[in-house]
Amino acid sequence: MTTFTNPLETTMTTTSLDRAERVQLKLFATPGAPDAPALIPVFHEWISDGSLETDELLIDVADYSHVKAGPGVLLIGHGADWSYDLEEERPGLLFSRKRAFAGDFRARLEDALRQALRAAGVLALDPRLPGLAFDARELLVRVPDRLHAPNDDASFAALVPHIVGAVRAVLGEDVGVRVSRVAKERSDVATGPLAARVVLEGAPAIARAQA
Amino acid sequence: MSAGSWKERLGDAVPETLAQEIDVFEEQIARKKSGRMDEKLFAETRLRRGAYGQRYDNGLRNDGRGQRRLAFPSDATKGVDTVFDAPGMQRIKNPYGLVTADQMEVMAECAEEYADRILHVTTRQDIQLHFVHVEDTPDMHRRLASGGSTTREACGNSVRNITACVYAGVCSSQSFDVTPYAEAAKEFLLGHPDVQDFGRKFKIAFSGCHDEPCGLVTFHDLGAVAKVREVDGAWKRGFELVVGGGLGAVPVEAKVLTEFCPEEELLPLTQAVCRVFARLGEKQSRARARIKFLVQKTGIEEFRRLVAEERALLRPDPRWTAYLENLSGQDVAGVRPAGPLPEDVSPDFARWAATNLRPQAQEGYFAATVTCPLGDFTADQARGFAALMRRYTGDKSCRLAVDQNVVFRWLSGADAPAFYARLQELGVADHGAGTLLEPTSCPGTDTCKLGIASSRGLTGELRRRLRVLDDAIDPDVKKLRIKASGCFNSCSQHHVADLGFMGVARNVGGRKVPHFNVVLGGQWTQNAGSYGQVVGAVPSKNVPDAVKVITDAYLAEREDEESFQAFVRRVGKGHVKKLLRPLMKPPSYEESPDHYRDWRDPREFGIGDLGVGECAGEVVPWVEYGLQTAEQELDAAQAHDEAGRFADASRAAFGSMITAARALLEHLEVQVRKDPEDVVEKFRTHLHETKLFHDPFAKGKFATYLLAMRASGRFEADAAELAHRNLDEANLFLEAAHAAYARLTAAAIAAGKRPSEVAARDLGSPEAPAPSPAE
């Protein structure tokens, strides 16, 4: 496992990461989170009422709650999706940037974090979802773009400073950030997309971050 | 670090012909986006690359309170009334369901990079990815092609995925392995000039034997059943060929084209059938363009003559027989030593093995079915499947099944517990394959443009409830199969389920209510030997209770070892309908608003932006009485049919259509007499020619049932087959009448007009003449 504890000493690597449009960021729910179908009416309401307050075009809700460790319930948008994700059998709010974002990769990552925090904050306050809270100490970042971000050491090295920079830009410069590459589950299984687990120290709680 | 594009990265890994085609498609996408390509031409081109439309791609979405325009960034389109930027579906062909380990991994990558991380197994052995942007499809096609998969002609008016038994080659009851023949047919027909000018799609299926269901040939456009026959003292391989079958709105059983087609004649005869279909099949009216209508029109004798005539004209093609020289070279065998199942196993494994393991013809090997709930599995699970293939069963051991599962063949019994343990880790170790616990569903309203009711919502709920009951379910009930389709296009194949469900909508007190027509007693065995009977419509939220009522009645009233099919035939639809009657009427909105929403969907069902109708409340409009009377007349017709009084059944079925048509005419304040002649003429003038009766997608199809029945005199038919057809058509006509009434009411309210003042343009934007997504 590669761990970076002093992000200020890392340097940007010139890669094609900037051309990777797709980036995903997950905030994990704390124990006691509701079952995924409880999110269906909430996501429908976000479409009809605009209660998420996002500029993204929201289109539909897809329910995969029957799939174990699957994508759960998705709010499908044009440029991005939000989902109550069940991967690793750990529920969480996953923001997935697909397209239609003008900035560079760092900007996409920052936006992903802001969007995820905002959505998580709204969900955490929704009375229809008792027990739903998010852990502000851990993130998952994934770049599902094997062309511009193959899952290799070079891509990971290039990704780390982006993560550290984005986290500090959004949550504050004094937040401790530890980034580790998500290890391959088994040697006989093909590699998934480039992914990093991010441990935060001193990050503000989700609700405060939203504010 | 990386190449600039997938085209550069993959280079020669994409076969040259495919690479050129994909380049052309990419260029066409760019031209369409900038408005430099014809709408319909691009749509058909896109479909032939397997890139399909999806729900809301007309840019409109009902959010439960009204229809809302989705503000996509561009006004560009990718077909008639199809927004360029709207998410779509990508279908990937897997001939006879074969997926190699490499292909599985590439599809997994595409699912997580271009779609929603889910791979969906269809009822015709395809994989579908949903929520895909059309501009991502060329790269996706390149990557799939590099792994040996194609999306070419996965949709559109061409030869669709060629299907076959998942157990071909490993089955004890097969005549011989049909795999190399299906592969040869795929290679021969893909892109063949003779299959490019169809008026509609064309589906081919292979079966290794007659009695097992796996091939389901009887409802295919062309079906081939393996047979061996003694010729001059030697055993000769060949096929019984059947033609003109189909499900859809009115299911039709395929007719025998020839009882024995020698193997060397398989491809030329198939080619001849395709040429006849291309030359004589309907091209203008999509609703009548499948080959089943051509066979019905010519009669099977004349169709045989036409095919023989066409066959005689064909110039010999070496591909017809070249593959026969290497049939054994395509055999696949186990990669691990054969072995028996261990005797000392865990209870969980034993339970799974009882339903999900099937002994192969080759001793010591098993076919393992991995249950995929609603046909779905994740990209991570797909990678796990590829690893399982490489470790236990071999690279070409995996096939997708028509009941939406994944089958691993060539699993050594000795390895089965370890294989199962890995499935547990992957989260796909549910038992119950091929039973009541694993219902099959089409996409329905989740993603399909034509879906009326939520078939996935329903089957998901049934699955959840049945798995809770599990051990409490009687074994004879547990072996029944459930299939649910979101509309009459029958993509779940509900006609051949024990308990089939077909989504419809009903107007109740000015609100639409999702319903499912209950179709009972279809035959899954004997290659889908017979179709189920339509009993009547039940509100969606009452379907789980309906399943319980029907299965309880079966257990309580069956005679000896009577099968479910025999039970349904014996007691008749009338009896079942009587049992279901308390469930058929939904409670009022005030009593249960939940009945006015679909499964797993909080939106009010289908009321769009029209609000509560004027008819809401206790006042029931006269037209609803008329439609109810028509339903009762159709019940009577069904009772006549069950009693073998076919002429009475035909007349009563026609009478029910007349009653429904008259009710609608009176709703429009048209002066109409009771005699059928006047009703039919006024219906033609005021409802058909005005397009007020037109279904948004099927157009005038259901109206023509009435017009044609009257014109042909078929309403007096006393032959069983014609009476059944009359009943099926009457049933669909009544459904269409309910739908037309709902549309007229909604439009009248929206426009502030009387129903008689509503014109076709008031019914909302006419939908694109979308091809049926039925595979």
Image: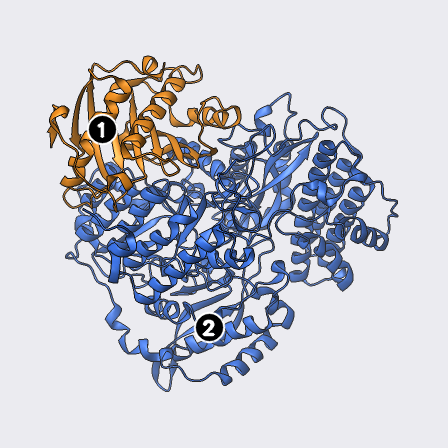
Chain colours: A orange, B blue
Q: Which residue is mark 2?
A: B193
Determine the image quadrant of residue B549. Answer: top right
Determine the image quadrant of residue B125. Answer: bottom left
**Which chain is disc 2 placed on?**
B
Q: Which residue is mark 1?
A: A163
Please name whichever residue, B696 or B549, is drawn nearer the observer in this view of the structure.
B696
**For discs 1 and 2, the disc positioned in front in the rendered view:** 1
Query: The residue under label 2 is which amino acid type?
Result: Pro
| SS type, badge 1 | helix
Query: The residue under label 1 is which amino acid type?
Result: Ile
Tag shown at residue B499: none
Q: Is residue A57 above or below residue A189?
A: above
Q: Is residue A94 visible?
A: yes
Tell me the CA gap for discs 1 and 2.
53 Å
Residue at coordinates 60% horizontally, 29% vertically from top-left?
A: B596
Residue B117: percent from the left, percent from the top?
34, 41
**Side of B680 where B464 appears, left or right:** left
Residue at coordinates 70% horizontally, 56% vertically from top-left?
A: B705
**Which chain is disc 1 placed on?**
A
Residue B406: percent from the left, percent from the top?
33, 49
Q: Is residue B494 above or below residue B185?
A: above
Residue A98: percent from the left, percent from the top?
36, 38
Q: Is residue B358 visible?
A: no
Task: Check whether the beta carbons of the residues at disc 1 and disc 2 lie within 8 A of each other.
Answer: no
Residue at coordinates 37% horizontally, 30% vertically from top-left?
A: A83
**Side of B388 where B248 appears, left or right:** right
